[in-house]
Amino acid sequence: MGTSSDIDVTFAGDDLVLRLASAVYLARFTGSSRIHCGSDLRLYFCWCTEHNLLPLLVVRAEIERYVRWMQEIRRFKPSTVARRTAVVTGFYRTCVIDGVIEHSPAEYVRRPRVPNESPTLGLSHLQFEALLTAGRDSANLFDFALVAMLGLLGLRIFEACKSDVEDIGEERGHRVLRVIGKGSKLALIPLPPAVGRAIDRAVGDRDRGPILLNTRGRRMDRHCATIRLRRLAQDSATRLPRMHPHMLRHSFVTTMRYDRARTNIDRHPNYILAANMASGT
């Protein structure tokens, strides 16, 4: 369980019960999810302090005021308001489960509607092939692996950066990459030959350590990956938008959204996508 010192949440006064309740709620999350939820909860507690409210004694109308404040004063996007409201709702739900409060004041608070379609724009087929080609031709051996892992495997950037050589293995005759995703869930991602070649090229003769390295020979992070992708976009023969890692995952997810075989390793859509992109690999 986390402690109040490592979640860094601002409280109204020095309420020990509130501190413990917050620690218990945030302990359900790990990694970046915990950081983001802690930030959202901190914003709410700060708002309560500014309005002389005790978070464990508020009523529904006060939380409705908080939602309107995010919408009308801070002018957050609907998706941001919905996410931060969901964190507050989750916190109070946990407080009810743990017997801290009897009823959740956020139970009937309405969240703004968020469109189903992601506002993030992916790359077209030709744009992605151009980026793959730029990665393959790059003098930096990790560029090709980065593009392939994000765009052909659909990994999140933190998943790609955290992947180690030791995570590569075999499962039922398939070469796979073991990935720890959101919620600490283990996934076995099949490696199509084209992606396997890109990773092998990056790994070389190393038998351990990160698959993706920065120019200093250390583990690549999100910031470095973004810089690498933007440089590849500049070097591409096709004009590409200003790149960031999620654009590649978005392209992958858009392609695979309706493929119900993605959980079957023998018929995994990674093979189909990599085959369709073979001209760039």
Image: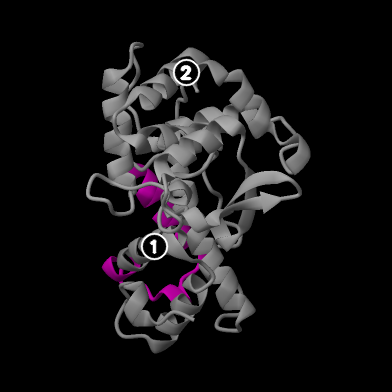
Please give the name of the residue rendered at 26% of the width and 20% of the height, measured from the top-left corner: 234
Magenta stretch: residue 226 in it?
Answer: no
Mark 1 sits on what residue? Answer: 35
Q: Residue 9, located in which quarter of the rendered image?
A: bottom left
> Which residue sits at x=76%, y=35%?
267
> What segment is highlighted magenta in the picture?
48-74
Determine which quarter of the picture holds residue 243.
top left
The numbered mark at residue 129 is 2
What's the residue at 37%, 81% (across, down)?
Answer: 4
Crowd class of label 1 (few under 14; some 14 to 19; many from 20; radius 10 Å) = some
What distance separates the C-alpha of mark 1 from that of mark 2?
35 Å
- What amino acid type should be assigned to the residue bearing mark 1? Ile
Q: Which residue sits furthest bottom?
A: 16
Asked whether the viewer can see residue 104, the reply is no
Task: Please report whichever mark, 1 or 2, sits nearer to the chain's N-terminal start.
Answer: 1
Residue 141 appears at what percent x and percent y? 35, 36
Q: In the rendered image of this protein, does residue 54 appear above or below residue 264?
A: below
Which percent across, then down, holds residue 93?
A: 59, 69
Considering the whole magenta stretch, tell me its main secondary structure: helix
Position of 258 with respect to 208 (left or right) is right
